[in-house]
Image (cartoon, helix red, strand yellow):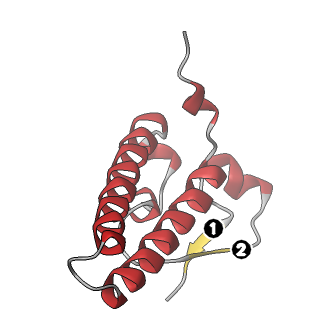
Amino acid sequence: MMDPLYRFLPWDHVVLGEKLRGCRGAVMGLLAAAPPDSETSRIARETIAAVDRLRSEMDCHLHITRPLRRDPRRLTRHIYAGATHFSGCLTTEEERAQDDFAGWELEE
């Protein structure tokens, strides 16, 4: 049976990567405010670990399913890792034919 995540498009990966980084940041803020020995702190640490595992799994999936030749700007490595953010940009049909991430650019 085919892996249903193969239907995940580059657009889906960019959006999910942004949301997972945001989620991790929000939980880190909670962890910083919670007493270290509290139940809240324990759950926050477990949540961060789970989000990191999911980011890693999705990053592996992205690298397996997107051929390197379809990513001439090498944006794949930034989708789930680091603190980079993406913004949409205008593209031509020719650019989209050569680059799976043509509608995205890294924010400085």
Q: Secondary structure at mark 1?
A: strand
Disc 1 to disc 2, C-alpha distance = 6 Å
| Left or right, residue 43 beside residue 87 | left
Task: Residue 101 in the image: state x and y as whole percent.
Answer: 60, 57
Residue shown at the point (49%, 89%) measured from the top left: 108
> How many numbered circles are shown?
2
Q: Is residue 36 above or below residue 79?
A: below
Q: Secondary structure at mark 2?
A: loop
Rendered image: mark on residue 12: none
Task: Residue 36 in the image: state x and y as whole percent.
Answer: 22, 81
| Left or right, residue 16 beside residue 46 | right
Q: Is residue 54 above or below residue 85?
A: above
Q: Are marks 1 and 2 in contact (CB under 8 Å)?
A: yes
**Frontmost residue, 3 versus 107:** 3
Rendered image: mark on residue 104: 1
Task: Residue 65 in the image: state x and y as whole percent.
Answer: 47, 35
Q: Is residue 39 above or below residue 100?
A: below
**Frontmost residue, 2 versus 10:** 2
Q: Is residue 1 above or below residue 26?
A: above
**Frontmost residue, 72 versus 1:** 1
Residue farthest toward the front in the current orientation of the protein: 38
| Left or right, residue 103 beside residue 4 | right
Residue shown at the point (49%, 53%) measured from the top left: 71
Counting residues from the start of the chain, the first of labels 1 and 2 encountered is 2
**Frontmost residue, 67 versus 81:** 81
Callout 1 amino acid: Trp
Rendered image: mark on residue 89: 2
